[in-house]
Amino acid sequence: MKSKLIALSLVSSVLFSCKKAENQTSNAGISGESKTSEQVQKTIEELKLDYVEEGAQDIITYDEVNAAQQAWCDALVKIGKIHQEGGDYKAFAEQVLTDAYNYDHGKVFFKPTLAFGDQTFRNDKKGALAYFVGGDKDYPNDKGFALKPWVKARYDNAGDGNQGIQIYGSTAITMGNVWVTDKDGNEVMVDKTWVFKKGKDGKLRIIVHKSALPYTPTSK
């Protein structure tokens, strides 16, 4: 009987110690989250954000979103330039897809401007690369959108200032237009929607890319 009481006492002591350690770990986590939340809340107030989800632990800034959009425009032009100069444009384009898109980290929904039929959506890197540089037998209709070449590209979000950007924490949505200009000075405008996600490394990557030519009503 005495040995049983000693055993029960030891079990109770172990359970109490484990529970105490668990509570200490939990409290430490809550403290850390509260600190992060305070930093996030400060950013939310500074940027006057309205849509951030409850409990967000990271915030994308308007500057980061604008920089990511401009980087996409610059990369498009550079792919064509490298191609014209006889460089390894395919390798550069693949690196752009690694840096600017989320293909290596998770899902990407990509609907290019000139894709159609059963190849309308390019949700893997192979399909996206084919669209930008062509040369893939599995995508025979792709001639390489980036190889025009385009000599200039710019973007503009809908509304004034940053009205065309919605920030929800570690994700941000943009809607507006992109203008691309060829070497003969011809300019084409497309409607563009992007969704960016900030990774653990702090980089913004595209998780949704929807592009389309503007609708033009048929004149009567």
Image (cartoon, rainbow, N blue to C red):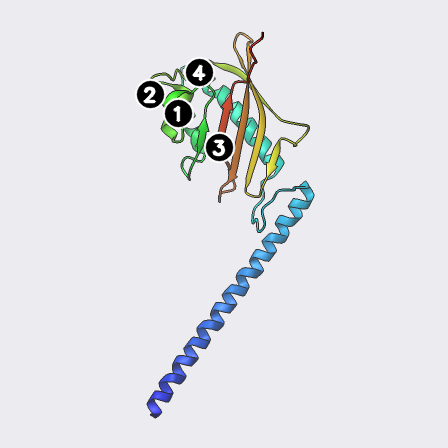
Mark positioned earlier in the residue sequence (3 or 4): 4
In this rendering, the answer to whether 118 lies above or below 84 is below
The residue sitting at 43% across, 32% down in the picture is: 98
Q: Which mark is residue 6?
A: none
The residue beneath circle 1 is: 129
Q: Are marks 1 and 2 in contact (CB under 8 Å)?
A: yes
- Residue with the most extreme left position: 137
Q: Quadrant of the N terminus?
A: bottom left
The residue sitting at 59% across, 53% down in the picture is: 36
Amino acid type of disc 4? Leu
Q: Residues within 10 Å of mark 4 (few under 14, many from 20)?
A: many
Q: Are marks 2 and 3 in contact (CB under 8 Å)?
A: no
Q: Is residue 156 left or right of residue 135?
A: right
Amino acid type of disc 2? Asp
Q: CA distance from mark 3 to mark 1?
A: 16 Å
Q: CA distance from mark 2 to mark 4?
A: 14 Å
Coordinates of residue 163 in the picture (x, y in percent): 65, 32
Q: Residues within 10 Å of mark 1 (few under 14, many from 20)?
A: many
